[in-house]
Image: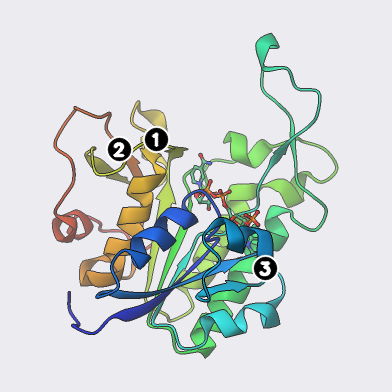
Amino acid sequence: MADSSPITVLVTGAGGRTGKLVYKKLKENPNQYVARGLVRTEESKQKIGGADDVFVGDIRDAESIVPAIQGIDSLIILTSAVPLIKPGFDPTKGGRPEFYFDDGAYPEQVDWIGQKNQIDAAKSAGVKHIVLVGSMGGTNPNHPLNSLAYDSFQSRMRESVWKRKAEQYLADSGVPYTIIRAGGLLDKDGGLRELLIGKDDDLLQTDTKTIPRADVAEVSIQALNIEEAKLKAFDLASRAEGVGAPTKDFKSFFSQITSQF
Ligand SMILES: NC(=O)c1ccc[n+]([C@@H]2O[C@H](COP(=O)([O-])OP(=O)(O)OC[C@H]3O[C@@H](n4cnc5c(N)ncnc54)[C@H](OP(=O)(O)O)[C@@H]3O)[C@@H](O)[C@H]2O)c1
């Protein structure tokens, strides 16, 4: 720790599958962090304990997120447009499901406008560091995330493309940042794997293209305290459990990253 007093950290998407792990980890370390969460609904707030440090707001509505962001030192962005499976898909028949997004909740609105709103609000509030979690696949227009449910809304549904636009906006914002582009997320235990850094989606061509959400949460939090994580953007995946040594030294880990975008 560079600083002995706790830093105030807001995680957005705190009711999401990775966001709630980050929120919990922050709360478990009150000597290091004053935790805050941002969720979209009162229902999500109750799901993660309903504490006063959980704010309710919609990232598409810039005004609604200002109270959560005022007074924080660091922001971890874990919001995402959530693709929904079209009714009628039968997994027993094989094939790939078709996806759709709710009206007004397309990647353009959530991953671009919504993330831009968070970055703008954080910059205005003098936030010192923004950690943005997104996905691998942004360099490849044929990645499944970019070709969800081709139809007349195609251009609005290119998820990774809108995320990439927000990443660029952050990198250009002047606020110190860490951009984490995660591989396929697994609901498995964290701290048991060797973590891998990649660039430009190269890990997508390998057998090591997934990572537990718990490890993504840990890397997001470690980035807050380690100078070597700042002004860096990288792909993140992991080896299988039992292959290689679990990553423990995060200063060395972040030092390997050479890419600023
Ligand atoms: N799934 C994968 O395999 C994969 C792979 C690589 C990277 N990623 C990326 O990793 C990150 C974390 O993924 P995850 O699966 O843990 O996330 P998730 O469970 O889908 O959570 C996303 C969160 O964003 C919130 N959100 C959506 N729209 C919002 C809005 N307008 N205002 C406020 N909050 C809003 C949702 O709130 P509600 O709870 O209210 O819906 C939800 O809590 C995402 O950026 C994702 O794209 C995912």
Q: Of label 3 and label 2, which has the lower sequence position?
A: 3
Which residue lies at the image location 43% right of the left edge and 51% below the top edge?
181
Disc 3 marks a residue whose amino acid type is: Ile
Which residue lies at the image location 82% right of the left edge and 38% below the top edge?
151
Disc 1 marks a residue whose amino acid type is: Thr
Query: Is 140 left, or right, of 8 in this rendering?
Result: right
**Residue holding disc 1:** 210
Disc 2 marks a residue whose amino acid type is: Ser
Residue 238: give its label.
Answer: 2
Q: CA distance from mark 1 to mark 3?
A: 27 Å
> Which color scheme does this rendered protein use?
rainbow
- Ligand 1 within 8 A of label 1's CB? yes
In the rendered view, tell whether residue 153 sits above or below residue 261.
Answer: above
In the rendered view, tell whether residue 92 sits above or below residue 172.
Answer: above
**Residue holding disc 3:** 113
Q: CA distance from mark 3 to mark 2?
A: 30 Å
Spot occupied by residue 246 in the image (x, y as percentages of width and height): 18, 40
Q: CA distance from mark 1 to mark 2?
A: 6 Å
Secondary structure of the residue carrying numbered label 3: helix
Total numbered badges shown on the rendered structure? 3
Spot occupied by residue 30 in the image (x, y as percentages of width and height): 30, 73
Q: Residue furthest right?
A: 152
Spot occupied by residue 167 in the image (x, y as percentages of width and height): 50, 63
Q: Are marks 1 and 3 in contact (CB under 8 Å)?
A: no
Q: Are marks 1 and 2 in contact (CB under 8 Å)?
A: yes
The quarter of the picture where the N terminus appears is bottom left
Viewer-proximal residue among 226 and 91: 91
Residue 50 visible in the picture: yes
